[in-house]
Image (cartoon, rainbow, N blue to C red):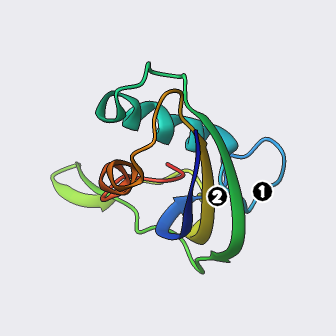
Amino acid sequence: MILIALNLRASRVNLLMNDFAAGLPSPLAFLGLAAAMAPELGAERWSIGVLPILHHVDVSEGRTKAEAAPKKGRFAPVEIVEDLTGSISVSVLFDIPDFDHDFKLKEALLGRRIGG
């Protein structure tokens, strides 16, 4: 059965790890979301089809704060790889074999990470 989760919002989404366009979350992140939810929904891992529909993407300005680590007897910032994060508004179509409990899908989505 195909179910849709409308107008999900996620913040601090990784927008750099997309092979197709920088500034969008990776499509594989949504497959990972479905795979993580599969056991809760009684489906085989990697059996759930996913189609994300991005409504809006806001790129965060600035860099992530560098982590501090001990260096020569005091704490100093550790250089980090440049990243690109932001928030998204997305609807997701789920094709879940032999499943028709939309309330269970809602419960499985609560608190999940989307887009890394």
- Whether residue 23 appears in this view of the structure is yes
Residue 22 placement (x, y as % from top left): 77, 56
Q: Is residue 72 left or right of residue 104?
A: left
Instruction: Examine the rendered structure and indicate whether residue 11 appears above or below residue 80.
Output: below
- Furthest residue to the top? 44
- Whether residue 84 appears in this view of the structure is no
Kind of residue at disc 2: Leu
Residue 39 found in image quarter: top left
Q: Looking at this view, is 92 or 26 the one in front?
A: 92
Tell me the element at label 2. loop
Report if the CB atoms under discs 2 and 1 are less than 8 Å apart: yes
Instruction: Read off the residue under disc 1.
Output: 22
Instruction: Examine the rendered structure and indicate whether residue 93 appears above or below residue 56.
Output: above
- Furthest residue to the right? 20
Structural crowding at the residue carrying mark 1, measured as other residues with C-alpha within 10 Å and reported as few (<14), some (14–19) or many (≥20): few
Residue 49 placement (x, y as % from top left): 63, 34
The residue drawn where x is 45% and y is 42% is 100
Q: Looking at this view, is 24 or 107 the one in front?
A: 107
Instruction: Read off the residue under disc 2.
Output: 15
The residue drawn where x is 34% and y is 27% is 42
The residue drawn where x is 58% and y is 44% is 30
Instruction: Examine the rendered structure and indicate whether residue 43 appears above or below residue 3.
Output: above
- How many circles with numbers are drawn on the protein? 2
